[in-house]
Image (cartoon, rainbow, N blue to C red):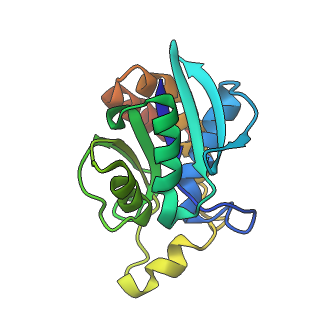
């Protein structure tokens, strides 16, 4: 079983914020691939299903971004899912809007959700799907930017979410390079 964690903040007031693109990604996957309805468990909303023959548990922590690790640890401990089978879907300031990178392990680049997952799991060996939202230009504007909603002019968001949902079976098969390539091709076709 794989655990795919969308990082974000709960509640309708946060739903369309840049910081919540991880929630948006797992929502798109759940819709596209007929996952179970979302339900409350592990201080989170969870949905389960399968992709390419692989069981997947989707998780949206209800603990707010900075405490995401507690929810991830509870779900991974219950299902005995090792860190190498956990993937965090999150916003990335250092990538251009709509760009996507996948990697295993590494640092947190100042991302509080990743930092808390590392704390709770006592390892950095989990995967990351870094979803580019761009940078506001100055570090003093970062907080307002990530907690701000996507502008109507940011018309890349829905095509990226559609592409992620379409390509998700490749990631489930462990084909992260093919997943990134497929997302890039699909988003090029729609722009």
- The quadrant holding residue 140 is bottom left
Q: Left or right: 134 with respect to 19?
A: left
Position of residue 47 relative to residue 159, above or below, is above
Q: Left or right: 75 with respect to 119?
A: right
Identity of the residue drawn at 63% across and 49% down: 44
Using the image as rendered, state which of residue 78 and residue 182 is in the foreground. Answer: 78
Q: Residue 64 appears at what percent x and percent y?
A: 58, 64
Q: Residue furthest left?
A: 106
Identity of the residue drawn at 53% across and 50% down: 71
Q: Residue 164 appears at what percent x and percent y?
A: 52, 37
Res. 189 in view: no
- The quadrant holding residue 160 is top right
Identity of the residue drawn at 30% across and 51% down: 122
Res. 14 in view: yes
- The quadrant holding residue 16 is bottom right
Position of residue 89 relative to residue 141, above or below, is above
Q: Residue 174 appears at what percent x and percent y?
A: 35, 23
Quarter of the image that includes the C terminus: top right
């Amino acid at each position: 079983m794989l655990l795919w964690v969308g990082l974000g903040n709960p509640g309708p007031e946060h739903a369309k914020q840049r910081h919540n693109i991880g929630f948006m990604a797992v929502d798109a996957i759940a819709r596209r691939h007929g996952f179970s309805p979302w339900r409350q468990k592990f201080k989170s909303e969870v949905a389960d299903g399968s992709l390419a023959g692989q069981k997947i548990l989707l998780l949206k922590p209800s603990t707010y971004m900075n405490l995401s690790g507690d929810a991830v640890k509870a779900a991974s401990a219950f299902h005995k899912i090792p860190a190498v089978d956990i993937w965090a879907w999150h916003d990335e300031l250092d990538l251009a809007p709509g760009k996507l990178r996948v990697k295993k392990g590494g640092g947190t680049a100042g991302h509080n959700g990743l930092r808390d997952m590392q704390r709770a799991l006592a390892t950095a060996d989990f995967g990351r799907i870094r979803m580019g939202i761009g940078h506001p230009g100055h570090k003093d504007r970062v907080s307002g930017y990530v907690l701000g909603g996507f502008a109507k002019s940011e018309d890349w968001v829905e095509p990226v979410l559609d592409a992620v949902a379409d390509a998700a079976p490749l990631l489930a098969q462990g084909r992260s390079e093919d997943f990134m390539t497929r997302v890039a091709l699909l988003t090029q076709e729609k722009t």
